[in-house]
Image (tube, rainbow, N blue to C red):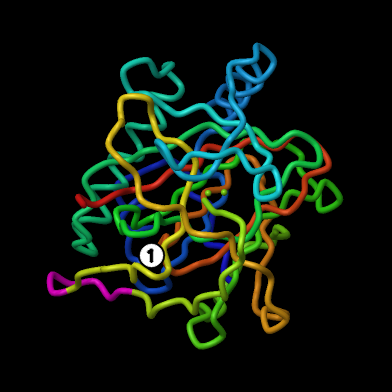
Amino acid sequence: MTIDPPVRGVTADALSAIALTLGERGLVIRDDFLPRELIAQLAEEARGLQNAGELRAAGIGRGRQFQANRAIRTDHIQWLDPDTATPAQRHYLDILEELRQAINRTLFLGLFEFEGHLAVYPPGAFYRKHLDQFQGSGQRLVTVILYLNPDWREADGGQLRLYLDPEHEPEPDPDPDPDPDPDPGQDPDPDPDPKPKPKPKPGPEHKHEPQPEREPSHEPGPEPKTEPDPEPRPALDSDPADAGRHQDLLPLAGRLVCFLSGDFPHEVLPARRERLSITGWFKKRD
């Protein structure tokens, strides 16, 4: 798996490059995506909310299907609301809006909004293997994760484990980043691990339609969303065949991971120290 060169400033060209790589590989990993000062401010806000008891235990499903299942996930979250966002959160949301537009210009996915949350994993917290889509709804097309953890080491755990199909594994970059590598819904009753679909190619004719049978559930959405929700899809059990075809990514401060939501089963391995991120999804209209 390739880690792309660090972004030195979030420029229009940098965002276009992310969109192009997403179309070619279905997966983009960028280090130093945001200035350290902004990452530090976002991390401080997440810790402050956790210490003040403002975060809630994450669950699976939404609305009447919501359930807190600690066998599946044990993180704590707070949804981002553009109307009440802090200046630091607003800055990041504005950058994501530019990224949404860049992806639409390049891949014609019809993305129309972003939804996301702060996530705090206390020591020992985890999130079992899953896909980032709801059963019966393919709205979430692109997952975007920003990590906020300075000085993270391999021994700290908490890696994002991405499951790859060998047939569609990205080719090595001629000049990979030297740094070492290593977040969202689901349910009991494991399902077989779905195979990732081929990555979309840029062009107006492309229409990305995730397969309904591959769609899992996720944690509760923002309070204003009260419409009925689809049935949650179970978490995915580990498959012995996965050995050798997954990649672990450390949740390094400033690292952005962006991938097609329906193509990459993934999990968060148990962390040995507090782990912070902002996880979200670009969505299409249902």
Q: Position of residue 10 (x, y in %)?
A: 40, 42
Q: Position of residue 23 (x, y in %)?
A: 33, 69
Which residue occupies 57% across, 22% down? 41
Quadrant housing residue 151: top right
In-front residue for pair 262/190: 190
Chief secondary structure of the magenta portion: loop
**Furthest-left residue in this view:** 204
Q: Position of residue 16 (x, y in %)?
A: 30, 56
**Furthest-top residue in this view:** 52
Mark 1: few, some, or many residues within 10 Å (few <14, many ≥20)? many
Which residue does the numbered mark 1 point to in the structure image? 22
Q: Amino acid at mark 1?
A: Leu
Left-right relation of 225 to 28: left
Quadrant including the N terminus? bottom right
In-front residue for pair 50/228: 228
Q: Position of residue 30 (x, y in %)?
A: 52, 54
User: Please, is residue 167 above or below residue 28 in the view?
Assistant: below
In-front residue for pair 188/41: 188
Q: Is residue 103 magenta?
A: no
Which residue occupies 48% across, 82% down? 168
User: Please, is residue 103 above or below residue 46 in the view?
Assistant: below
**Furthest-front residue in this view:** 64
Magenta extent: 200-205
